Image (cartoon, rainbow, N blue to C red):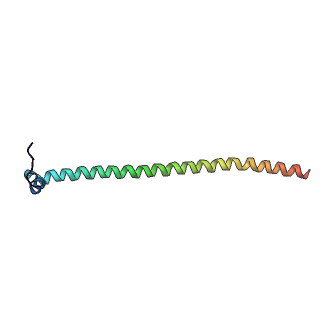
Amino acid sequence: MNPAFHSWAAFFAMGGYAFYVWLAVAATLLSLLSLWAHTLWQHKQLLADIQRREAREQRIRQANQAPTQQAKNVAHSQEKTQ
């Protein structure tokens, strides 16, 4: 097996096509990093949205229970006065 490049300088020169090769490598890495960063951002947004929805549902449940509890308290206080 023969090495394709005999020195690091030859490797980085890519046989005279270094500009195109390294531009393609840079574009690929930039695309992958952008995709990774966007995925992380979406993940954080999704978790925040889930937390907001759960907090809203909890507030709705508490609001629905409050009138029931108030009615029980009123009924209990009326029983005590009679």
Q: Residue at x 62, y 51 (%)?
A: 59
* Nearer to the camera, 37 or 64: 37
Q: Residue at x 25, y 51 (%)?
A: 29
Quadrant position of the N terminus in the picture: top left
The total of numbered circles placed on residues is 0
Q: Position of residue 62 (x, y in %)?
A: 66, 50
Q: Residue at x 49, y 52 (%)?
A: 48
Q: Position of residue 36 (x, y in %)?
A: 34, 50
Q: Is residue 15 left or right of residue 46?
A: left
Furthest residue toward front: 1
Furthest residue toward bottom: 9
* Nearer to the camera, 1 or 42: 1
Furthest residue toward top: 1
Q: Is residue 35 left or right of residue 2?
A: right
Q: Position of residue 77 (x, y in %)?
A: 85, 52
Q: Position of residue 47 (x, y in %)?
A: 48, 50
Q: Residue at x 78, y 48 (%)?
A: 71
Q: Is residue 60 left or right of residue 75?
A: left
Furthest residue toward right: 82
Q: Is residue 8 left or right of residue 77?
A: left
